[in-house]
Amino acid sequence: MADIAVEHVRQHFGFGADHPTPDVFLISGSGLSELASEPIASLSYEPIPGFPRASVAGHGNELVLQQVGTKLVLAMSGRLHLYEGHTPQDVTFPVRLSRALGIETLIITNACGGLNPDYRAGDVMLIGDHINLMGANPLIGPNDPQGTRFPDMSEPYTLKLRELALQVARDSGMNLRRGVYVGVPGPSLETNAEYKMLRIIGGDAVGMSTVPEVIVAAHAGMNVLGFSVVTDLCVPPVQPVTFAEIVHNARLAEPSLKQLIRGCIERM
C-alpha cells in the first residue's frame, strides 16, 4: 500500500514530470502549512491509499505543494497524533511517504507548554533534542528498509540546520529560544507534579507530537529541523488553560514562525 500511495502522490503533483522532487516536507498545524501566498497544488488525504485522517479541530486534511524562493515544499495541512487513536506507524506514515518520494529534509513544528521558567507564551523554541515519554516507538516491529535496525539518535535534529535557524533568527532580530522537547501521549494536560518531573529530567517544553515523526525521519536518514511554539506556561503552580487559549496563543506566533521557516528554506 505504501508503494501505491507514493505513486498516487507522485502522479497527482507531477513529480519527475511537471515538477522536480520537493526539497522539504513540512509537518505543522493547518495555519502554518501555507508558507506561500499561492500554493501550486493540493491533494486531500482521503484518496491517498493508507493515509490516515486528522481529526483535531483546526487541522486540515490535505497535502499542499508550494514554492518558497527557489525551493519546493510539500506540506501537511493537518497533522496526526497518537491521542486520536492512530498507531505510531499511522502517525509516521507521511514521513515514510515523503522519504520514498525522495525528499531529504523534514521541518516540523508544534504547539507546546513551556517548562522553562524563562519562557513566555508566544516564544518560539528551536528544538535541540527530545525526550520520548510517549510510551511508543514507531520503529517497533519489522525493520523498514529505509533504515538500519538500530538507528543512531545522537543528533536527531540536524546541527547544520539548527545553526542556520539561529542565523536567520539573528538576522531578523528574533529571540529564538533553544531547548529540549518532551513528547507525551496526551490528550490530558499534565499535573503540577508531572510538570515538576519533566523539568527535573531536562525538559524545556512539553507537547503531544513530533517525537514519532522525528524518530522515523532519523531512521530514514533525513535532515530534521524542529520548532516549538510556547502556548502556555507550565511552571507550577499552573493556571488552568483551555484548548481555545492554546490555539489563540499559537496563532499569535504564526507570523514570526512563518518568516523564520521561510528564511531557513530559502537559505538551504
Image: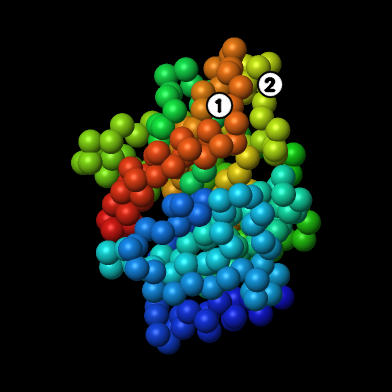
Where residue 83 appears, x then y in whole percent?
72, 45
Q: How is the image coloured?
A: rainbow
Q: Residue at horizontal 57%, vertical 46%?
A: 210
Quarter of the image holding residue 47?
Answer: bottom right
The circle drawn on residue 203 is: 1
Q: On screen, 78 above or below 12?
A: above
Where residue 158 appears, x then y in whole percent?
44, 47
Q: Residue at horizontal 70%, vertical 70%?
A: 50
Q: What residue did someone put label 2 on?
A: 191
Where residue 110 appears, x then y in whole percent?
52, 43
Q: Residue at horizontal 71%, vertical 57%?
A: 89
Which residue lies most toward the bottom here? Answer: 17
Front-most of residues 163 and 84: 84
Front-most of residues 197 and 65: 65
Circle 1: residue type = Gly
Q: On screen, 54 above or below 1?
A: above
Q: Residue at horizontal 52%, vertical 40%?
A: 247
User: Do the residues bearing badges 2 and 1 touch, measured as CB atoms within 8 Å?
Assistant: no
Q: Is residue 56 visible?
A: yes
Circle 2: residue type = Thr
Give the mark, 2 or 1, whose residue is nearer the N terminus. Answer: 2
* Disc 1 residue crowd, few under 14, some 14–19, many 20+, Cα 10 Å: many
Query: How many discs appear?
Result: 2
Q: Secondary structure at mark 1?
A: loop
| Measured Cα–Cα span from mark 2 to mark 1 | 15 Å
Q: Secondary structure at mark 2?
A: loop
